Amino acid sequence: MVNVFQKKVLMLALYAGEIMMRNGAEVYRVEDTMTRICKSCKIDSVEVFATPTGIFISMDKGGDEDDTQTYIKRISGINTDLRKISDVNHFSRQFTTTDLSVDKGMEILKDIDEKKGYPLALRVIGAIMVSAAFCVIMGGRAIDCCIAIVSGALCYLFSRLLKKADINSFVTGFCSCALASFIALFASLSIKGANYDPIIISAIMLFVPGVALTNSIRDFLSGDMLSGVARLMEAILTAISLAAGAGVVIKLFDILGGAI
């Protein structure tokens, strides 16, 4: 039977993997971190299988007649917080190279998990900078950049509001890009010289699933085909929802004889 200490180690590794997966880590990184934590505690007979929606970990003492203990953790509400992934990576190195206790390790992981993200004001500033930069890249003029700044800030705040209401990411992306298109088209009608194309594109870039696509490719390269396909489909469906949100509003303006 797995003793109490081994069970604590298993729960510690599972919690570390859960934090990483919930914040956008690659599957191979999650599996490697969990395995290293277990093996640093002299638990060699451990198997980890992670997917974007769940983590499976099992261990025993390695004997032919030993009972295997398995835990499953359901993963939901995946976000992107690279700082937490980095913190768990740092913790795993600290845990495997020092005499840090399992109980203390669990406290550190809880602190990492409960750590608040960047302030909303700082995130809005980031959204403004991204929108302005992409507007310039897409050939927007000074007036377009000013509108893109307002559009980016409003769309990002709107997306945060929808997430607080537990609206799924696909509907959030659809509605946010629809709002971006409406603002851009309305501004192009009201302000002389405004061009809606760079304004819409600059706002949409805030919601492009770049992390999901990158992780999908990295999972494919590391041989995790199941996770690679799952994340690739997530990225594709998210991109479709963004395009649909912008396209519906543009088509409605076209039908109503608006900006097009």
Image: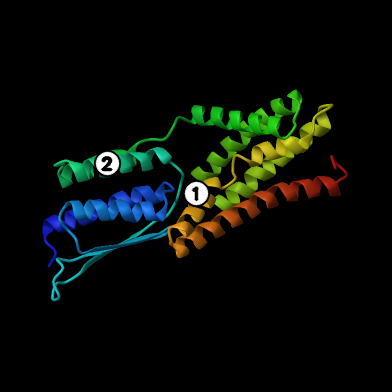
**Residue 75 x, y percent position in the rendering:** 39, 56
User: Residue shown at 19%/42% (left/top)?
Assistant: 97
Q: Amino acid at mark 2?
A: Phe
Residues 85 and 176: in front is: 85
Quadrant for the C terminus in the image = top right
Residue pointed to by mark 2: 91
Given this view, does label 2 or label 1 mark the residue nearer the observer?
Answer: 2
Q: Position of residue 6 (x, y in %)?
A: 15, 57
Horizontal relation, residue 138 to residue 225: left or right? right
Vertical relation: 25 (above or below) 56: above
Position of residue 61 measured from the top left corner of the image (x, y, whole percent): 14, 66
Question: What residue is shown at x 69% (from left), y 52% (from top)?
Answer: 244
Reading the image, the residue beneath label 1 is: 166
Disc number for residue 44: none
Mark 2 closeness class: few <14, some 14–19, many ≥20 residues within 10 Å: many
Is residue 167 visible in this depiction of the protein?
no
Residue found at x 42% / y 59%: 53
Q: Quadrant of residue 107?
A: top left
- Please identify the quadrant where the N terminus is shown: bottom left
- The disc, 2 or 1, on the residue closer to the chain's N-terminal end is 2
Left of 46 or right of it: where is 163? right
Q: Residue furthest front?
A: 221
Q: Could you say whether the residue bearing mark 2 is in a helix, strand or loop?
A: helix
Q: Image height check: is 51 above or below 257?
A: below
Of 106 and 98, the residue lying toward us: 98
